[in-house]
Amino acid sequence: MATEGEIMLKPGMVPPPPGEESQTVVLPPGWQSYLSPQGRRYYVNTTTNETTWERPSSSPGIPASPGPHRSSLPPTVNGYHASGTPAHPPETAHMSLRKSTGDSQNLGSSSPSKKQSKENTITINCVTFPHPDTMPEQQLLKPTEWSYCDYFWADKKDPQGNGTVAGFELLLQKQLKGKQMQKEMSEFIRERIKIEEDYAKNLAKLSQNSLAAQEEGSLGEAWAQVKKSLADEAEVHLKFSAKLHSEVEKPLMNFRENFKKDMKKCDHHIADLRKQLASRYAAVEKARKALTERQRDLEMKTQQLEIKLSNKTEEDIKKARRKSTQAGDDLMRCVDLYNQAQSKWFEEMVTTTLELERLEVERVEMIRQHLCQYTQLRHETDMFNQSTVEPVDQLLRKVDPAKDRELWVREHKTGNIRPVDMEI
């Protein structure tokens, strides 16, 4: 990797003979001129690494005239840009790659300086982001919402360890946790159903109990109704438990039955794309290193030839130049493949996060509706229970202790002649 201030040559380009330009033209501070293999002169700012075909003026960094630039040059490998471009524009895509503002004037340096990369992009875990210190904040894909597709591009430090967790993995964990919560809610309702069934069974059993069955009169009728109301209430609770099963528990359990399997497929798909991205990134770094070595070799051989320290022939120079050019082409190809992989990963991330978001909204709404159904059934059960005790209440209001005493006396009387004192 070139250091700051080091002149980066396009593969196949060599500096002009020493002193040729300096004898005729005075360049601004920091600028040097070089000749391309075709003999065309270009200029490099050794401080900023800016390159241009036009001779710079007295103001550093500004060409003497705005003349046209060679359109056949490959784009700068700044932030891993090549011929492939992301499917989404940078202003709306979080992970899209930004070209530097100097691309139109760059000569096509196949290996950007550290300063350029630092100013424009930053690579984290093989993903290229705009550098936060120099790039304006990107427009959100869904500006009016706190949407999944806008806030889960970077990796997050794992609170359980020293590693990191991808943003997509956080979303996936959220979905799987939601699935688990839904399952536990279903189990909770099942326990509620069991309680209702046991309660109904015990009520029905108690209604058949013979205790106090010999009570007579209007109180006896009220007591018989009390026991009958237990049987009626048991039936109400049985119906309530049946509806809880069919209208609450079962839908909760069956909703997204194959959800975990679908999420596993989705996880593997995104993970594979991320692995491919990492592989392409490694290939870029390898090609970048190879290009640096080829450029260094070309520069060394050229300097040795110029100062007559070696018997290297022009053919050796040409061979080294061809290898340097080939290394530059390999780098651009690797960069293009990297950008394609990142673009594909970006597209799939947007699509998948939007789908996960839709599924989560659907899950929450479904649970809300079925819990509302639970409360509605509960209210209905209370109403039916109330109806079972209303006859009891009516009979209790009719209980007349005096009348009960009269009826009992009439039925069980033994005579109304009272005893008298014995006489001697």
Image (cartoon, grey):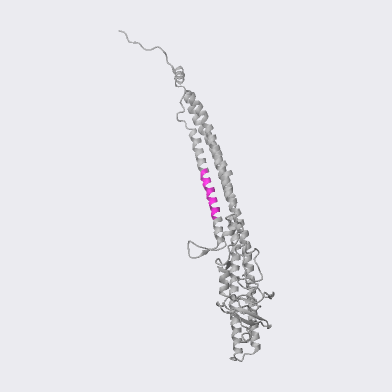
Q: Position of residue 110 (x, y in %)?
A: 62, 76
Question: Can see residue 314?
Answer: yes
- Work out whether residue 70 or residue 184 is closer to the camera in this orientation and state it: 70
Question: Can see residue 258?
Answer: no
Q: Position of residue 262 (x, y in %)?
A: 60, 57
The quarter holding residue 314 reads bottom right
The quarter holding residue 323 reads bottom right
Q: Kindly give the residue lying farthest to the top in the view shown.
A: 424
Q: Position of residue 104 (x, y in %)?
A: 65, 72
- Work out whether residue 236 or residue 25 is closer to the camera in this orientation and state it: 25
- Who's the residue at 55% across and 50% down the image? 182
- Work out whether residue 423 or residue 267 is closer to the camera in this orientation and state it: 267
Q: Is residue 390 magenta?
A: no
Q: Is residue 184 magenta?
A: yes
Q: Kindly give the residue lying farthest to the front in the view shown.
A: 58
The quarter holding residue 52 reads bottom right
Q: How many marks?
A: 0
- Work out whether residue 377 or residue 39 is closer to the camera in this orientation and state it: 39
Q: Position of residue 424 (x, y in %)?
A: 30, 7
Against 112, residue 224 (above or below) is: above
Q: In which quadrant of the rendered image does the N terminus lie?
A: bottom right
Against 254, residue 347 (above or below) is: below
Magenta extent? 176-192
Main secondary structure found in the magenta portion: helix
- Who's the residue at 49% across and 36% down the image? 203
Task: Name the side, left or right, on which 228 lies relative to 345.
Answer: left
